[in-house]
Image: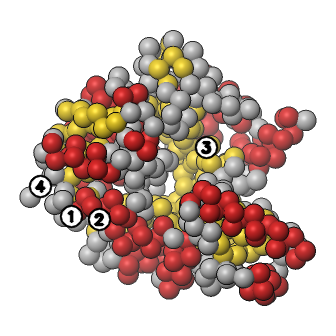
Amino acid sequence: MAITRILIANRGEIALRIHRAAHEMGIETVAVHSTADADAMHVRLADHAVCIGPPPAADSYLNVANIISAAEIAHCDAIHPGYGFLSENAKFAEIVEAHDITWIGPKPEHILTMGDKVAAKNTAGELGLPLVPGSPGAVDSIEEARAVAAEIGYPVLVKAASGGGGRGMKVVPSEDQLESLMGQARSEAKNAFGDDTVYIEKYLGNPRHIEFQIFGDGNGNAIHLGERDCSLQRRHQKVLEEAPSPILSSEERERMGGICARAMAQMGYRGAGTIEFLWEDGAFYFIEMNTRLQVEHPVTEAITGVDLVREQIRIADGKPLSVTQEEIEFKGHAIECRINAEDPFTFAPSPGLVSAYHAAGGMHVRVDSGLYTGYRVPPYYDSMIAKLIVYGRSREGCIMRLRRALEEMVIEGVKTSIPLHCALLDEPDILNGDYSIKWLEDWLAQRAD
């Protein structure tokens, strides 16, 4: 039976993004919201809306029972989780399917496997993806840790097997610091994720973060839609993303994209996924796979012309991939700026009333946002309030258009990261595409001195 009504288990710009794709397919939408989001744009535009709890996410957007109840009350036949919140919760996916509701996402077993970093690394190796040298699995003792670190060479990285965002992650420069830093990583992981399991990898000195977008139909067919360069990061959080990467050749793209697509076909993967790598000196090293839509998916849409959310819904509805690998063409260049409600240089959160809002416009300028004049940015959720996505026939042209769009965009009443992006576009390294995952934090440290 075809999907006719989707519950959107999310908020903000991604909830709007899903609503728009669904409506263009003739599918009704049901927005769920906390009491803090009663006046949010996704709630205003959806066909139906259901309040699922008070402001804290644990009582609303992470409340599985309330979301399932909302889906049943509103007679939804599918749930789209967006990104964040419950999007990579395998148990939630299982519960959705157990209630005879279509889960718009990967198979629960694949979410579970890729959500555990040790299992994900082992699976990636079995599927032929290149790995960072390190422990074959969890490291249980300091003796085992010393043996692994001695074999791969210092510096090494101790990483939590569960979670992300830089928590439970420690760089160990030498053997005499291993025991102390490994203990700190375990403690952080236990506090953040309830799991103190860690593993060890070779620490790469100055890599880039490059990820490949893939899609599978769940029946052994998969394609890739090229790569995104997400190297501009602060505390492991992406700030700006672009596609294609300034440093990859078309031959490297075809080779690595093919490796990723074949791996996902072998896995029987269903829906959207992103395989993330560190890249250094021409070599790729698998770090993780995200079994969901990415925040930065619009830059891929811009250079391929493929609507990724529409594709997610089609595949969940049992339809085949709408394009073949041969039909995908990579054209031009796209850059996304994440615009957060925060101080642009101290990054202190800045919730509050938006007193004036004007979205940038013009040819090949896209703004994904739920903002409007009079909207109150709540203090309870992620600080991202908009995404500015710009396309150009060349990277240089894209940057020129992005600079103009940033100057044109107005958000008053709260501080935003727009001045940070404007400053970045004045930097020669950014203009030349010559940056790594360490570049932004080094630049910010120099500014602070």
Q: Position of residue 368 (x, y in %)?
A: 43, 34
Closer to the chain start, of discs 1 and 3, is: 1
**Residue at mark 2 to residue at mark 1: CA–CA distance:** 6 Å
Q: Which residue is mark 4?
A: 2
Residue at left 28%, top 25%?
44
**Residue at mark 4 to residue at mark 1: CA–CA distance:** 18 Å
Closer to the chain start, of discs 2 and 3, is: 2
Look at discs 1 and 3 and give the one toward the viewer: 1
Quadrant of residue 218 within the rendered picture:
bottom left
Look at discs 2 and 3 and give the one toward the viewer: 2
Q: Which residue is mark 1?
A: 98
**Residue at mark 1 to residue at mark 3: CA–CA distance:** 38 Å
Residue at left 35%, top 63%?
91
Q: Is residue 157 left or right of residue 417?
A: right
Q: Amino acid at mark 3?
A: Leu
Residue situated in front as seen by the camera: 184 or 266:
184
Residue at left 37%, top 40%?
60
Callout 1: few (<14), some (14-19), or many (20+) C-alpha neighbours within 10 Å?
few
Q: Which residue is mark 3?
A: 240
Q: Position of residue 412 (x, y in %)?
A: 56, 15
Q: Amino acid at mark 1?
A: Ala
Asked if residue 84 can be seen in this view, the reply is yes
Callout 4: SS: loop
Q: Is residue 435 left or right of residue 101?
A: right
Callout 2: SS: helix
Disc 4 to disc 1: CB gap under 8 Å: no
> What numbered label is drawn on residue 94?
2
Disc 4 to disc 2: CB gap under 8 Å: no
Closer to the chain start, of discs 4 and 3, is: 4
Quadrant of residue 173 within the rendered picture:
bottom right
Callout 3: few (<14), some (14-19), or many (20+) C-alpha neighbours within 10 Å?
many
